[in-house]
Image (cartoon, grey):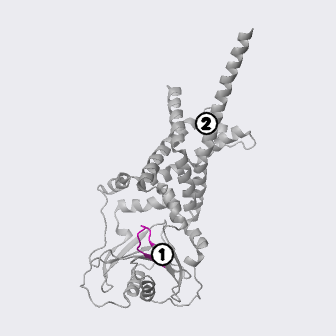
């Protein structure tokens, strides 16, 4: 019974690995790159993110910066405005285009100079993210990565069954014999490394299903709230259309920092219609874990606060859902967990490679045995 179970596990591990191996390799490798996106973005695109400024230098009003962007890009509606907490960072205006990601313009908040413009669809990390989520194949790719992710979860479970030690091979299962021949070393790299990263990569892969399947996302809310996710949207403006306020955005920014005094990235999301309010979110960098965000809604006409959606008042389902992204990316406790996620993702990318080498080695060995038996049979005939 035990041997039959291991044989089934072995066949599942082999064929699911062959089917999903290339996808797992691409997804894991791109995932390792995305771990340090926040740190690498300013390095890859310094003009887009970083400006020179004196410590006490005051920034220009946000409305003034908006007018510069509107003048330079009259045909593109502003979708989002991103303000980083660091003093020496640009303010980024995301503009609507045919592409989903849009066009982004970075502006020096001290001089009003547009430092860089880029098509977000062509940006390095945007391409890497599309590869990671759906292989740059849109809906078809999303189906492929989703199925491959489920296969990978089964591969990990069957791999643990195959790895499980007995009294004779306990030491072999827990350590890599670095001075061994290539075949043994490759097996150790696959099996031993696979065992040590299993709890981490299983959690990363399982949380990745949230983006592949809506029912997985809804399951979080059903588990913690007892009901499906409530779709949130910006409330309607309270006031009627009036005279345009020259310092509307600056007023909203000041009130946001007053309501949410903690340091963190601020994101303005402009309403899709004039009847809806402006959504402003702010990350709490002082929180014990990352991705703790509160939302404020401001009247588009006069900048008055319409309503709040503070993190502490969110449902348990929403709080649990907020943890999915930092767990998946390794950002949950900052740099230490990012380093772990980076190493785990790189090892995960190596597993299909070492696995294929093991499989090819067995095929060659099988052919040699078959050839040897045929040779012996021919020699016996000659007597």
Which quadrant, please, contains the C terminus?
top right
Check whether the beta carbons of the residues at disc 2 and disc 1 lie within 8 A of each other: no
Rounded to the nearest whole Å, what is the CA distance between mark 2 and mark 1? 47 Å
The spot of residue 51 in percent (x, y) is 58, 82
For the point 38% across and 87% down, the residue is 251
Main secondary structure type of the part rendered in magenta: loop
Circle 1 packing at 10 Å, graded few (<14), some (14-19), many (20+), is: many
For the point 53% across and 53% down, the residue is 27
Q: Nearer the viewer, residue 260 or 70?
A: 70
- Give the residue number, with chain letter if any, for mark 2: 359
For the point 48% across and 61% down, the residue is 326
Residue 265 magenta-drawn? no
Circle 2 packing at 10 Å, graded few (<14), some (14-19), many (20+), is: few
Vertical placement of 160 versus 141: above or below?
above
Residue 102 visible in this rendered orientation of the protein: yes
Give the mark toward the camera: 2 or 1: 1
Secondary structure under tag 1 reads strand
Vertical placement of 58 versus 29: above or below?
below
- Give the residue number, with chain letter if any, for mark 1: 104
Q: Nearer the viewer, residue 46 or 197?
A: 46
Dot 2 or dot 1, earlier in sequence: 1
Residue 263 visible in this rendered orientation of the protein: no
User: Does residue 278 appear to the left or right of 66 in the view shown?
Assistant: left
Q: Quadrant of residue 171?
A: top right
The spot of residue 261 in percent (x, y) is 44, 80
Q: Quadrant of residue 319?
A: bottom left
Secondary structure under tag 2 reads helix
Please give the range of residues in magenta.
92-102
User: Does residue 219 appear to the left or right of 183 in the view shown?
Assistant: left
Q: Residue furthest top?
A: 383
The spot of residue 128 in percent (x, y) is 53, 61
Q: Quadrant of residue 269?
A: bottom left
């Amino acid at each position: 019974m035990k041997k039959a179970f291991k044989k089934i596990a072995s066949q599942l591990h082999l064929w699911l690995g062959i089917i999903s191996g290339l996808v797992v390799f691409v997804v894991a490798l791109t995932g390792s790159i995305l771990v340090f996106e926040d740190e690498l973005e300013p390095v890859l695109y310094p003009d887009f993110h970083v400006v020179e400024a004196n410590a006490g230098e005051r920034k220009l009003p946000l409305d003034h910066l908006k007018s510069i962007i509107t003048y330079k890009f009259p045909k593109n509606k502003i979708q989002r405005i991103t303000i980083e907490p660091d003093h020496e960072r640009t303010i980024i205006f995301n503009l609507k285009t045919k592409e989903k990601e849009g066009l982004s313009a970075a502006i020096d908040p001290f001089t009003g100079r547009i430092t860089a413009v880029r098509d977000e669809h062509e940006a390095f990390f945007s391409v890497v993210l599309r590869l990671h989520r759906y292989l740059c194949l849109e809906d078809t790719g999303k189906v492929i990565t989703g199925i491959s992710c489920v296969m990978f979860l089964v591969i990990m479970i069957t791999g643990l069954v195959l790895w499980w030690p007995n009294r004779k091979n306990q030491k072999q299962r827990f350590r890599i014999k670095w001075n061994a021949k290539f075949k043994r070393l490759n097996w150790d790299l696959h099996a031993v490394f696979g065992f040590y990263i299993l709890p981490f990569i299983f959690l990363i892969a399982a949380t990745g299903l949230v983006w592949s399947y809506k029912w997985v996302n809804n399951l979080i809310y059903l588990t913690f709230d007892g009901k499906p996710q409530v779709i949130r949207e910006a409330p309607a403006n309270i006031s009627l259309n009036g005279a345009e306020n020259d310092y509307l955005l600056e007023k909203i920014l000041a009130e946001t920092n007053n309501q949410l005094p903690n340091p963190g990235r601020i994101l303005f999301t402009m309403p899709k219609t004039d009847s809806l309010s402006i959504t402003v979110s702010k990350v709490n960098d002082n929180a014990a874990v990352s991705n703790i965000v509160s939302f404020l809604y401001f009247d588009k006409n006069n900048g008055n606060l319409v309503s709040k959606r503070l993190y502490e008042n969110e449902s348990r389902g929403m709080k649990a859902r907020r943890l999915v992204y930092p767990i998946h990316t390794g950002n949950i406790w900052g740099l230490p967990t990012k380093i772990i996620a980076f190493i785990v993702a790189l090892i995960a990318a190596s597993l299909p490679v070492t696995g294929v080498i093991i499989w090819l080695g067995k095929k060659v060995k099988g052919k040699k045995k078959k050839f040897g038996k045929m040779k012996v049979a021919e020699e016996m005939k000659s007597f």
